[in-house]
Image (cartoon, helix red, strand yellow):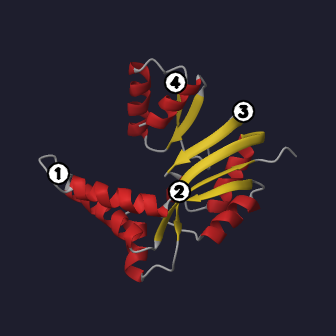
Amino acid sequence: MGGPARYLAETFHCQVHSVELQGNLVTLSRELNRKTGLEKSVIVVEGDILETDWKEYFNGIVSFLTFLHISDKPRLWSRVHGCLKPGAAFCVEDYFCRRTPTSEEEDSIRNVVGVPVLQTKGEYLQSVEGAGLVPVQWQDLSETWAHWTKERYEQAGSGEKKAAGHLLEFYKVVADLFESGMLGGVRISGIRPES
């Protein structure tokens, strides 16, 4: 609902543009921006990042666990390249495939988690570099996220405020996929070259 965008805008006194596919989340984000006095600093656009026609270039792009839902990775990274000013940076937190999934894991990652294409580290970097971007750092967060997702699942399944069935199932599947060693987490950063 735009929490990271509001944090960036308020902390760094910058303007943040975000794109959201779901109309109800756009409405909610705009309302939260208004309530926090950040409606002029955080601009929320309803649309698909692959289709949104930005009229300007950006100093940076960040994404937290969003790119994983987009199947056309080469096109996605080409859009990132096209939206960045030369010399500008990107930072993305995402999932990647650490080992070949079983058919059950593949079904879970697609149908429960909503990840249509899960790339290996090599495939991921090839998509980034193929778009003309330069990866600077690949930070493997898999162990940290494995611990965190397991803890999240355990907390959501206990106590008075137990999570709803479908959300609890989602938490369990993600925790299990990390624990199995198949699913990895990454923070990748890089730049669009000057020329």
Q: Which residue is mark 4?
A: 10
Q: Residue 42, can we see it?
A: no
- The residue closer to the viewer here, 122 or 81, is 122
Residue 94 is tagged as: 2
Mark 4 or mark 3, which has the lower sequence index?
A: 4
Mark 3 or mark 2, which has the lower sequence index?
A: 3
Measure the alpha-carbon separation of dots 3 and 2: 25 Å
Query: Residue at the spot x=54%, y=19% of the render?
Result: 40
Q: Secondary structure at mark 4?
A: helix
Q: Which residue is mark 1?
A: 162
Query: Residue at the spot x=48%, y=63% of the render?
Result: 142
Measure the alpha-carbon separation of dots 1 and 3: 44 Å
Which amino acid type is marked by label 1? Lys
Mark 1 or mark 4, which has the lower sequence index?
A: 4
163, above or below 116, in the image: above
Q: Secondary structure at mark 2?
A: strand
Q: Which residue is mark 3?
A: 56
- Residue 100, image x, y percentages: 51, 80
Measure the alpha-carbon separation of dots 1 and 4: 33 Å
Measure the alpha-carbon separation of dots 4 and 3: 22 Å
Mark 1 or mark 3, which has the lower sequence index?
A: 3
